[in-house]
Amino acid sequence: MTMRALVIDDSRAMRRIVGTILKDFGYEVREAGDGRQALDVLQEGFTPDLCCIDWNMPVMDGLQFVMAVRANPAYRQVTLMMVTTESETGQIVKALAAGAHEYLIKPFTADAMRDKLALLGLLPEGVSA
């Protein structure tokens, strides 16, 4: 069974970087440019195993997206990982308190992403931790 990911970032380049890493691990990847677009993707019926979420975006930022997803029982099984330049401890605590499961600080390596996915139990079969 293919694992699915939704990459949410207002930077097209960043979406491509994160998306490529996830595709290399065997994920089916969809993208959204902000939290609002991401909610639209979910409402269209794409249910990801993982959302990789930037914090600073127009329209709806990452924290607002996390809170919106957590407020909807239909998305309870979706794992949320912030992927952001926000590195202050206070920000990390705020995101985790809002319902994010993990936090990856940019810039990061494919190995760092793999380690987080392994921690979350979201490494597809055949990908070694």
Image (spheres, rainbow, N blue to C red):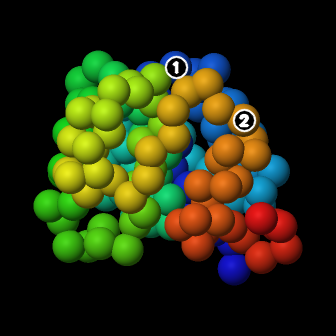
| Quarter of the rendering occupied by the C terminus | bottom right
Q: Identify the residue under disc 1.
A: 11
Q: Is residue 8 left or right of residue 96?
A: right
Sort mark 2 into few (<14), some (14-19) or many (20+) by Cα contacts within 10 Å: some
Determine whether the residue tagged by mark 2 lies in a helix, strand or loop.
loop
Number of numbered discs visible in the structure rendering: 2
| Quarter of the rendering occupied by the N terminus | bottom right
Residue located 75% across and 46% down the image: 111
Q: CA distance from mark 1 to mark 2?
A: 17 Å
The correct choice, above or below, for 67 with respect to 31 in the image is below
The correct choice, above or below, for 103 with respect to 114 in the image is above
Q: Is residue 60 visible?
A: yes
Residue located 43% across and 63% down the image: 79
Q: Residue furthest bottom?
A: 1
Which numbered marker is on residue 109? Answer: 2
Which numbered marker is on residue 41? Answer: none
Q: Is residue 119 left or right of residue 95?
A: right
Residue type beneath disc 1: Ser
Residue type beneath disc 2: Thr
User: What is the x, y in percent for residue 80?
Assistant: 40, 55
The correct choice, above or below, for 120 with respect to 37 in the image is below
Q: Nearer the viewer, residue 14 or 83?
A: 83
User: What is the x, y in percent for residue 51?
Assistant: 46, 52
Q: Quadrant of residue 92?
A: top left
User: Nearer the viewer's eye, disc 1 or disc 2?
Assistant: 2
User: What is the x, y in percent for residue 6?
Assistant: 51, 50
The correct choice, above or below, for 38 with respect to 60 in the image is below
Q: Quadrant of residue 8?
A: top left
User: What is the x, y in percent for residue 76?
Assistant: 29, 72
Determine whether the residue tagged by mark 1 lies in a helix, strand or loop.
loop
Q: Is residue 2 left or right of residue 14?
A: right
Q: Residue furthest left?
A: 71
